[in-house]
Amino acid sequence: MIVTIILVISLIISLLIVIKAADLFVDNLVEIGLVFGISEIILGVTAAAIGTSLPEFGSAMLAILTGNPEVGIGCAIGANIWNIGGILGISTIFAGTILSQKEEIRRDGSMTLITALIITIFMFMFGELNLIVGIVLLSIYIIYIWILIRAQQNNVKNNKKSFVTTKKEKKKRLKKENVFWVITGLIGLAVGCRVIVYSTVTLAEIASIPEMLAGILLAFGTTAPEFFTVLTSARKGLNRLAVGTVLGSNIFNILIGLGVPSLFVVIPVEEIAIRFDGPAMIVLTFLLIVLLRRRMKLTRAEGVILLSSYIIYMGTRLYIMS
């Protein structure tokens, strides 16, 4: 009993550390990027998605590399399903309406669906994630970043005034504290994620919970940055940030979260992930795109649909496991 309490406390504390570490890393990385003249828009699109995904990436990678692959895969796929059904659903219900744009749906929505399809096909074909899978996933992510850069360059041409750098910004210099906090953030992520994985796996063993399901439950905690970012963005009317964070995070979770560890180890995949979790991720992603394309927005009713879909998914999965 005492061990369980200590593990739960350790899990909560490490989650808080990881969330704060991710904030420090992203905020200061943006500052460094601006010093070197990297577009704020590119930094925003990538940093918002990548930064909020760092906790699940770190947790998934460490789980895989330390001998708990089912936890890692469950964390990545579970996070994607929760991002759409839970986070975006709840945020839409609270905000009332979340707007989107055709370009965003066509580019980021399509890439999110493609990554869900690809990882599910690979799991079905090989029954594992290996070096070939890792190379393909990373290559796709590089192509996606190139597409983002080209899109930003086109925006610069179409509206130069929006991207004019002020003289004050040009004179910005690299600050030592920015570098310090980037390094500190990375260390915090590494240590915090290691404790999260250990605590979750141990608690799962104590409660006799399958590792794959433990990974899905772990996704609730590691997606906390996405949840608060999307919810706050939606309530403030920052619609593109809200939708973009979810879509960008889902792309990152699969292409980097599973692609990087696949380069180092062969990751076995449970049958339920192949036949249920993967297809469920595809269905929820497709549902989101359909709802967005109808009127270029999500309403409170559609938020209920997304959240209900997630509840059905979890209920069905728990029934299958039992």
Image (cartoon, rainbow, N blue to C red):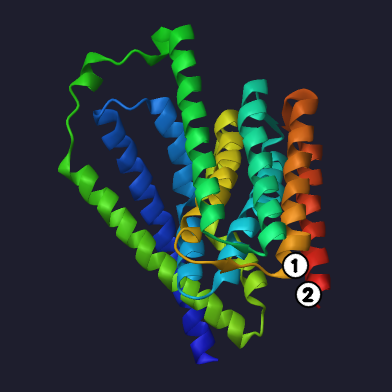
Q: Which residue is the site of mark 1?
A: 272
Q: Who's the residue at 70% across and 46% down the image? A: 117
In the image, residue 9 sits, relative to residue 92, either above or below, namely below
Side (left or right) of 260 relative to 122: left
Residue drawn 37% across and 55% down? 21
Do the numbered discs 2 and 1 sit on residues whose CB atoms are within 8 Å? yes
Disc number for residue 135: none
Q: CA separation, marks 2 and 1?
A: 9 Å
Q: Secondary structure at mark 1?
A: helix
Q: Secondary structure at mark 2?
A: helix
Q: Give me the disc on residue 321.
A: 2
> Of the residues under marks 2 and 1, which one precedes in the sequence?
1
Measured from the top left, where is residue 182 in percent x and y?
28, 49
> Is residue 35 shown above or below 309?
above
Q: Amino acid at mark 1?
A: Ile
Where does residue 81 sit, x and y in percent of width and height? 68, 53
- Would you place residue 249 above or below residue 171 in this image? below
Q: Residues within 10 Å of mark 2 (few under 14, many from 20)?
A: few
Q: Amino acid at mark 2?
A: Met
Q: Nearer the viewer, residue 81 or 298?
A: 81
Instruction: Please tell me which residue is depicted at 31% across the width and 60% down the height of the picture.
Output: 187
Residue 214 placement, left or right of 142: right
